[in-house]
Amino acid sequence: MALVVQKYGGTSVGTIEKIRNVAQRVARTYDEGNDVVVIVSAMAGETNKLVDLANAMCEFPNEREYDVLVSTGEQVTIALLSMCLQSMGYKAKSYLGPQIPIKTDSAFSRARILEIGEENIREDLKGGTIVVVAGFQGVDSEGNITTLGRGGSDTSAVAVAAGLKADVCEIYTDVDGVYTTDPRIVSDASKIEKISYEEMLEMASLGAKVLQIRSVEFAKKYDVVIHVRSSFNDNPGTLVMKEDAEMETVLVSGVTYNKDEAKISVMRVPDKPGIAARIFSPLSEANISVDMIIQNVSTQGMTDLTFTVPRTDLKKALKIIEEAAQGIGAAGVTSDDKVAKVSIVGVGMRSHSGVASKMFNALSAEGVNILMISTSEIKISCVIEDKYTELAVRVLHDAFGLGNAS
């Protein structure tokens, strides 16, 4: 008997019929002799509707009340799935995040999991009950409902799998694995059989939508093998696991893109100690993530500082940065929300040279101008004008021979 944690995303539970299909898959896993814990997202589109309601009510919703609102979507799906399993003759019980409890910090809408309560789940599993858990949500030390950020149900699933020491964590979605790039842009994108935690971390952080980055961080930290699969067929998916020698032979594993990018520039910043902290600390305190940062060469004691933030945080970030710029005596602030980031990822980059020049030459040949560059051991990212995103993805996918025909 194995302990299997399964997670089903919004598209997998988007209708009553799809919830019935999920129930049948869960029942089949249970009938094979396994203990089963299921984590589900809200039905497709429901969280967006709740977010729209919050934004319609006021420009900057209170963060605590925002989490109270957007966490309700998962409550619907856990109840419906449990009802369906019970109607099929199985023992099933639903839990909200605070009922487990899934304990988090108090960073509303971006909360981090601190601890998973095991007692309630283990007691139910001993009695042969299929446990159905609301993803995306938890509770802080004050008893407030918190949410983990978009895609947080992946993190819930991996954290529960780690806490219970599950044998496998299956992430079911609308695609049957991790692909070399978005198949909607490149028709011959190929499915990756297995990928390292490091590569998946980079791909998730760079825009790949299959897994949320924090779920991969949890998996790597606690050595949880993730199996990314489709909820609409029984095809083998992609294993996310420890790096092995076979993975290192592949130069580039995938091409990612992210259109949720905005660029902010602070002009003529005094070039002296402590200035960068005065610019970026207020963003950190507001839980706004800063990605790529470029500082120009200092001229006459002044420099320009450019960085990227999520496009959804641009308005909030600009307000903060304009106040900070005024406080340090900078000349002004400009922004651009018509940018995107394209990246190549692969553990093989560690032992191969010439990857960057190949990427830059491929983009240059198509007239794609690079605005910013960022690198790590296993990835290279470029910020470009967002109108060239699809072209850049296709060009890079072809340049590194990632298609099925390769």
Image (cartoon, rainbow, N blue to C red):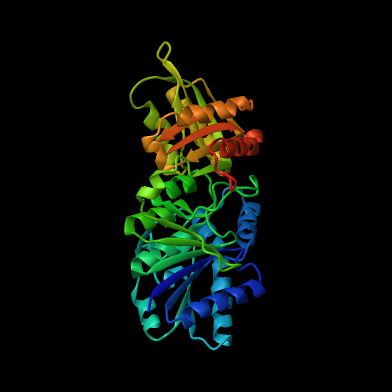
Return the x and y of residue 224 as percentages of the image width and height: 37, 61
- Is residue 126 positioned above or below 48 on the image? below
- Toward the viewer: 1 or 26? 1
Kindly give the residue lying farthest to the bottom in the view shown.
89
- Toward the viewer: 133 or 58? 133
Kindly give the residue lying farthest to the front in the view shown.
405
* Viewport quadrant of the C terminus: top right
The part of the image, by quadrant, that contains residue 218 is bottom left
- Toward the viewer: 368 or 301? 368
- Is residue 179 positioned above or below 291 on the image? below
* Viewport quadrant of the N terminus: bottom left
Residue at the image position 56 percent from the left and 77 percent from the top: 23
Kindly give the residue lying farthest to the top in the view shown.
300
Return the x and y of residue 81 as percentages of the image width and height: 56, 76
Return the x and y of residue 280 as percentages of the image width and height: 42, 34
Q: Can residue 181 be spotted in the picture?
A: yes
Q: Can residue 334 be spotted in the picture?
A: no
Return the x and y of residue 287 as percentages of the image width and height: 45, 45
Residue at the image position 52 percent from the left and 56 percent from the top: 151
